[in-house]
Image (tube, helix red, strand yellow):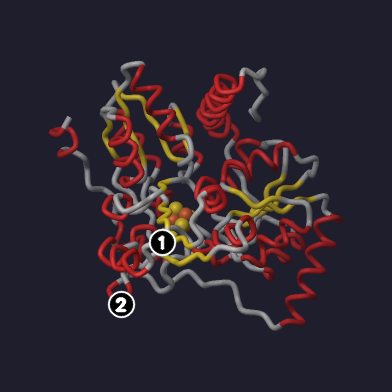
Amino acid sequence: MIPEKAELPLQVDLERIRRQAWTAPPAPTLDEATRQALRARIKRLLEERNAVLVAHYYVDEELQSLADETGGCVSDSLEMARFGHAHPAETIVVAGVRFMGETAKILNPEKRVLMPTLQAECSLDLSCPADAFSAFCDQHPDRTVVVYANTSAEVKARADWVVTSSIAVKVVEHLHARGEKILWAPDRYLGAYVEEVTGADMILWQGSCIVHDEFRADALRKLKAEHPEAAVLVHPESPPDVIALADVVGSTTQIIQAAKDLPNKVFIVATDRGIFYKMKEVAPDKTFIEAPTGGLAASCGSCAHCPWMAMNGLTNLAEALEQDGPEHEIHVDPEVGREARKSIKRMLDFAESLKVQATGEANVASPA
Ligand code: SF4
């Protein structure tokens, strides 16, 4: 196993991706009158276009609140796609990053999927180009290919399974119990975490999230000492020494749930600060503190907030609905979409089977 890891091609140019990320232009700050006018216009356009707005936890709270107010949803990438599937609207407007729009399109090929900007990338997706990844898979035909949701449609199509951070451990445990060896991509930290928890035989692609990569264990230890009453909530895209300091390691949805369920009144949170909007909503009497990042030594311009998520704003959201054109519409090759859907559906069916085991209830059909 170790020699195989040593042979991994270091094909991921993370420095270049980091530089690209921190030059992404954030959505403009608006004066109050413009804000209100745009919110009213977007509400009207959503109705006129028979569209629903789904927003990720990491986008600006302006868009999260608008999604809530207009009957849309705020959630993680998979739930965004599932919600869009179940909703009767003909058009899904995705406020997030490009792979989220693609996932929505993969699960809803019959619907139109629009985004405020198609330039909103993700370093995990960028670090895993489909050709190089496919060649890597070809070198390891004995391994089951498991990819994280933060990947392109083509990479999902090449995979056997797509997983989200909330179910990655369960899926790999299941495969490990069946004696399968895993090829994991693209997040090296989430992969290492899953490997450690499950004991599975995994080789890891070397991508990382440029936001979570900036959390620092030394500074977190100091902050914990200043707030001994605080629980530390960490997303597993963070470095291993940061994960080691966590009271709870979990996906975005699991972190929000922990804020609600744990008795602590103070939380130190190592994930994108966009999540604070929902955390404050579910636990309004609690205090949330951003986990420390690299500070002056960091490569980021706005640590703990994804620069690509920050590109989503009211102005380009209104444009997407108004123009209803190719600069905002997500397309996925139908054949690629069909293959990617199989890998996603495997996870959705597995998730349903876990619910059945836990509750004994009848299975519920997943979007396919
Ligand atoms: S926060 Fe990280 S994983 Fe999420 S979209 Fe941004 S770069 Fe990708």
**Three-letter code, disc 1:** Glu
Against 255, residue 319 (above or below) is below
Is residue 122 in sight in this rendering? no
Q: Is residue 62 above or below residue 70?
A: below
Residue 36 vs 107, above or below: the answer is below
In the image, taking residue 9 as reference, residue 283 lies left or right, namely right
Ligand 1 within 8 A of label 2's CB?
A: no
Q: Which one is in front, 362 or 35?
A: 362
Q: Which residue is at the far left?
A: 3
Residue 229, numbered label: 1
**Quarter of the image where one finds residue 217:** bottom left
Q: Quadrant of residue 338?
A: top right
Residue tagged 2: 296
Q: Residue at x 32, y 47 (%)?
A: 189
Decide: is 261 above or below 67: above
Question: How far is mark 2 from mark 1, CA to CA?
Answer: 27 Å
Q: Quadrant of residue 44?
A: bottom right
The reply to whether residue 337 is visible in this rendering is: yes
Crowding near pointer 1: few (<14 within 10 Å), some, many (20+)?
few
Work out whether mark 2 precedes mark 1 in sequence or the reverse, and give the earlier one: 1
Q: Quadrant of the N terminus?
A: top left
